[in-house]
Image (cartoon, rainbow, N blue to C red):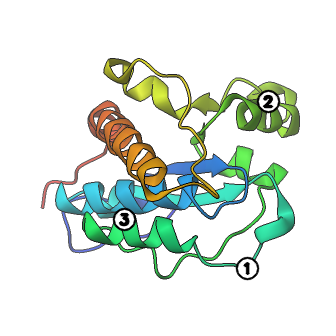
Amino acid sequence: MRGDCSLMLVCAAMSIGVLFVCTGNICRSPTAAGVFRTMARRAGLAQAFTIDSAGTYEGHVGETASPLALEVARRRGYDLSSHRARLLTNADIEKFDYPLAMDRSHLVAMRWMAPRALSDRPQMFMKFAPQARVVEVPDPYGGPAQGYERALDLIEAGCAGLLAHLKPLVRVETV
């Protein structure tokens, strides 16, 4: 990813691209993007990352995050209100350093879409939270608020692990 340096100590010229992918891009992936964005900002590393989300299903393109995703995230201090769902593209796999799948079907889709040289780039998101002992973030769509709470628990654990993994890769400028 490329960008500009700001007055902050973190230089975005070499920002790390993180893309969260789920099915409709209205529950899990926008929540993960919002959580990771907030965690990076709180750590003083907002400029170090380019963060986005996308879905493998085009049926929700242009929609906001689901009402329960918005509410559950808001109660924990995450703002997803500016999110609009978009469809995953082949270019996303090339553009983002870390295209992360919420479940195995998303991983398969991304690896199928990826250029041959980048087919190993997409990864499972929950690999960054081995302590959770799950491989996938279950899809809460259409279910009760408890499903969204559980998904957010896993997403927070995954984002914390991802941030810890990526911190050593952040280039810090000394002013």
- To which quarter of the image does residue 41 belong? bottom left
Q: Residue at x 30, y 46 (%)?
A: 171
Residue kind at label 3, given as amino acid type: Ala
Whether 37 is drawn above or below 95: the answer is below
- What residue is pinned by disc 3? 73
Q: Looking at the picture, how far across and down is residue 108, in whole percent? A: 79, 29
Residue identifier under label 1: 62
Secondary structure under tag 2 reads helix
The mark that comes first in sequence, 1 or 2, is: 1
Quadrant position of the N terminus in the picture: bottom right
Image quarter of residue 59: bottom right
Percent of width and height locating residue 40: 28, 56
Mark found first going from the N terminus, 3 or 2:
3
Which is nearer the eye, 133 or 12? 133
Q: Residues within 10 Å of mark 2 (few under 14, many from 20)?
A: some
Residue 1 visible in the current orientation: no
| Any part of residue 164 in sight | yes
Q: Quadrant of the C terminus?
A: bottom left
Q: Which residue is mark 2?
A: 108
Pointer 3 with pointer 2, Cβ within 8 A: no
The amino acid marked with disc number 2 is Val
Looking at the image, is mark 3 or mark 1 nearer the viewer?
A: 3
Q: Which of 115 and 26 lies nearest the eye of the viewer?
A: 26
Q: Position of residue 13 (x, y in %)?
A: 43, 59
Horizontally, residue 43 falls left or right of residue 121, namely left
Of mark 3 and mark 1, the one earlier in the sequence is 1
Q: Is residue 164 left or right of residue 9?
A: right
Q: Residue at x 72, y 51 (%)?
A: 23
User: Which amino acid lies under the numbered mark 1 shown in the image of this protein?
Assistant: Gly
